[in-house]
């Protein structure tokens, strides 16, 4: 994917990026997160709505890398979709951690409950 295509996608609305994420993950069957040198995944905090933590996720390695360009300690890591659905999402739900789907160039992000993302991903998978 060219830098121009990456920039164009990152400038889309949260909803447009969310739809792109679902389609791309449905096709590729993997989710991308960022991890640090100690193998800990990136978890962000928002002060909106009383404050909450969320795991940012991306549909491709290129988008995760683009987000991490200002932090040399962060590296993209692929999670196979079955593992994400069966282990990660239930764990995030148990720990009350939301999911931030595909942060944009302006740091806007679609925040969703793990159970809602699971349902949307399963609905998308049923179309393939």
Image (spheres, helix red, strand yellow):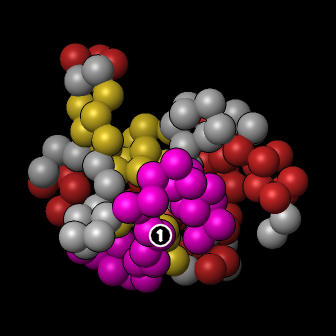
Across and down, in percent, residue 26 comes to 61, 73
- The part of the image, by quadrant, that contains residue 40 is bottom left
Q: Nearer the viewer, residue 113 or 53?
A: 53
User: Measuring 59% from the left and 70% from the top, which residue is drawn there?
Assistant: 61
Q: Can residue 89 be spotted in the picture?
A: no
Q: Main secondary structure of the magenta part?
A: helix
Residue 66 as seen in the image, left or right of residue 83: right
User: Measuring 65% from the left and 38% from the top, which residue is drawn there?
Assistant: 105
- The part of the image, by quadrant, that contains residue 84 is bottom left
* Residue range (magenta): 61-88
Q: Nearer the viewer, residue 126 or 88?
A: 88
Q: Quadrant of the C terminus?
A: bottom right
Which residue, given by chain and number where applicable, does mark 1 sit on?
Answer: 76
Most distant residue in the left direction = 94
Q: How many marks?
A: 1
Q: Quadrant of the N terminus?
A: bottom right
Across and down, in percent, residue 55 comes to 34, 51
Q: Is residue 86 above or below residue 49?
A: below
Q: Can residue 64 be spotted in the picture?
A: yes
Residue 88 as seen in the image, left or right of residue 28: left
Q: Say which element carries label 1.
A: strand
Residue 4 as seen in the image, left or right of residue 98: right
């Amino acid at each position: 994917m060219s830098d121009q295509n990456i920039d164009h996608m990152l400038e889309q609305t949260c909803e447009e990026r969310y739809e792109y994420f679902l389609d791309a993950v449905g096709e590729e069957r993997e989710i991308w997160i960022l991890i640090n040198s100690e193998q800990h995944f990136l978890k962000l905090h928002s002060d909106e709505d009383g404050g909450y933590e969320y795991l940012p996720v991306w549909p491709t390695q290129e988008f995760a890398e683009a987000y991490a360009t200002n932090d040399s300690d962060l590296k993209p890591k692929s999670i196979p979709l079955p593992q994400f659905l069966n282990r990660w999402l239930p764990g995030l739900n148990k720990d009350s951690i939301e999911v931030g789907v595909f942060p944009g160039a302006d740091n806007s992000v679609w925040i969703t409950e793990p159970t809602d993302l699971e349902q949307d991903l399963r609905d998308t998978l049923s179309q393939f």
